[in-house]
Image (cartoon, rainbow, N blue to C red):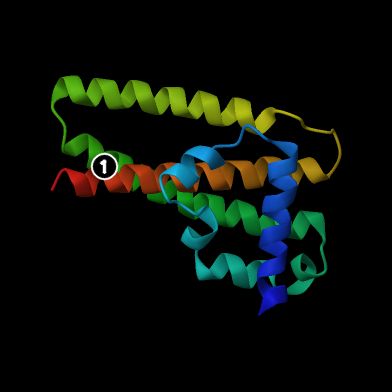
Amino acid sequence: MLFRRSIPAVLLLALAAATPALAQPSARAMGIDPEKEYSPAYDRCLNSGDALKGVTVAMAGCTNVELQKQDARLNRAYKAAMAKRSKPQQASLRTAQRAWIKRRDAECQEDLTGGTIDMLNIGGCHLSMTTVRAVELERMVKARR
């Protein structure tokens, strides 16, 4: 069980070291642990085959599949949040979302080494930040009920 969680933990530690400006303080302040939000399939993927052996490409593949799931989650939450807002509030949320995308992309590009670990760092950064943002948007929707 400990080893089962060690690969995602290693990814997050490597990611935190490589991108210190990651949205983690915001996530912590909001009580969001992105790792707890990932699908069980992500954990299974990281703990099987070449990913379990630490093969970078396999681990990045697992992360990319999970990122697609979390991005779809974010898009559903964004659409739901937009649907519950007036036109001026929609404009404000749209502006905030566009700013978030720019910030995520910039933060995930910081401190890249040019090595293969960048595949894990950038993918893990996008996954973590996208997951946190999806939870934030879901909370916005729930608060409007």
What residue appears at the point 66 percent right and 61 percent down from the top-left corner? 8
Q: Position of residue 5 (x, y in %)?
A: 66, 69
Q: Is residue 11 left or right of residue 43?
A: right
**Is disc 1 placed on a helix, strand or loop?**
helix
The residue lying toward the viewer, choosing from 90 and 32, is: 32
**Residue nearest the viewer, comparing 58 with 18:** 18
- At label 1, which amino acid type do we have? Met
Q: Residue furthest front?
A: 29
Q: Quadrant of the N terminus?
A: bottom right
In percent of width and height, residue 124 lies at: 64, 47
Label 1 CA crowd tier, 10 Å (few <14, some 14–19, many 20+): some
* Residue located beneath label 1 in the image: 140
Q: Residue at x 16, y 38 (%)?
A: 84
Viewed as shown, does residue 118 lie left or right of 2?
right
Percent position of residue 94, x then y: 32, 25
Is the residue 133 above or below the residue 45 in the image?
above
Q: Residue at x 71, y 54 (%)?
A: 11
As drawn, is 38 to the left or to the right of 19?
left
Q: Quadrant of residue 23?
A: top right
Compare residues 84 and 23 and report the one nearer the observer. Answer: 23
Residue 42, position as x, y percentages in the image: 58, 65
Pick the residue in front: 78 or 4: 4
Query: Residue at coordinates 74% horizontally, 41% vertically from top-left?
Result: 17
Q: Is residue 5 above or below residue 64?
A: below
Q: Number of numbered discs present? A: 1
Name the outermost residue toward the bottom. Answer: 1
